[in-house]
């Protein structure tokens, strides 16, 4: 595979991954190869390669004779996802404090500002994506690439869980959790950071309720912007 092909593969992967993070693709949604080929203008070989990669990240389930669907985590899976996040995010926070620079702090604050603006404007999908981006970026400050990549997978799985188990009518609201964590990291307050992160993740898990998922199979609707961009290219 040449470099250009790898780059385009990554772009398509990011489009699907982002749709999961923003809950435009929800648990159980079918990923029809023919529609994805049409949406992205690529062959089935490329789509299958990307679906396999997504399945290794536990975002997609490849079912024999049934094709690919967005993963549907069980309640116990959700508990384990958040347990894993606590181990990673609380465990690495001391390194995050140690390596955090002024530039890192500004990047994190910018994400929080955009996240809060999305919440206030009613941009739910954008707020969810930025919340996930915050956690991945925060872990990246620790300068440990494998842990950052693992957390990126767990964040996507958390978004699936949120889409599946969130209480009906739940509204996102601006709170100070993320900015408080940023300020504590910038101040090198590792103990305080651990406490803040533990509380934050526990609260996020506690807000989930077991609910029947809704189906969303309209891939052309989910990737409408991609189709529009290709049409005008």
Image: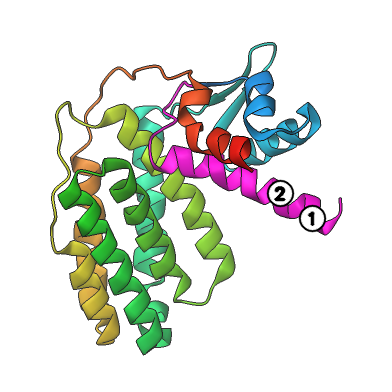
Above or below, comparing residue 10 to residue 68 in the picture? below
* Color scheme of the displayed model: rainbow
Residue that appears at 22% across and 79% down: 183
Q: Where is residue 42 in the image (x, y as percent from the top left)?
A: 74, 33
- Name the mark on residue 4: 1
- Residue at the far top in the pictured view: 65
Above or below, comparing residue 184 to residue 168 in the picture? below
Q: Does the magenta stretch include residue 22?
A: yes
Q: Does dot 1 land on a helix, a strand or a loop?
A: helix
Residue that appears at 45% across and 44% down: 156
Q: Can residue 58 be seen in this view?
A: no
Residue that appears at 15% across and 34% down: 170
The magenta span reads 1-29
Q: Position of residue 95 (x, y in %)?
A: 42, 80
Q: Mark 1 and mark 2 in contact (Cβ < 8 Å)?
A: yes
Q: Where is residue 46 in the image (x, y as percent from the top left)?
A: 76, 36
Q: Tell me if 57 is positioned left or right of 71 in this view.
A: right
Q: In which quarter of the image is the C terminus?
A: top right
Mark 2 sits on what residue?
8
């Amino acid at each position: 595979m040449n470099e250009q092909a790898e780059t385009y593969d990554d772009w398509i992967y990011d489009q699907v991954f982002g749709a999961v993070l923003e809950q435009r693709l929800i648990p159980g949604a079918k990923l029809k190869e023919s529609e994805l080929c049409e949406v992205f203008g690529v062959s089935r070989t490329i789509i299958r390669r990307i679906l396999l990669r997504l399945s290794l990240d536990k975002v997609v389930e490849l079912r024999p004779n049934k094709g690919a669907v967005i993963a549907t985590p069980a309640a116990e899976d959700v508990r384990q996802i958040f347990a894993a996040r606590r181990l990673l995010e609380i465990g690495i926070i001391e390194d995050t404090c140690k390596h955090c620079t002024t530039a890192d702090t500004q990047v994190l604050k910018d994400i929080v500002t955009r996240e809060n603006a999305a919440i206030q404007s009613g941009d739910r999908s954008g707020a969810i994506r930025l919340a996930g981006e915050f956690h991945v970026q925060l872990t990246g400050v620790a300068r440990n690439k494998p842990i950052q990549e693992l957390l990126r997978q767990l964040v996507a799985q958390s978004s699936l869980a949120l889409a599946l188990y969130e209480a009906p009518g739940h509204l996102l609201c601006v709170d100070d959790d993320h900015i408080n964590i940023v300020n504590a990291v910038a101040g090198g307050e590792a103990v305080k950071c651990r406490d803040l992160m533990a509380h934050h993740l526990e609260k996020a898990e506690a807000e989930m309720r077991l609910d029947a998922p809704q189906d969303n199979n309209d891939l052309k609707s989910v990737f409408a912007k991609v189709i529009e961009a290709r049409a005008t290219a």
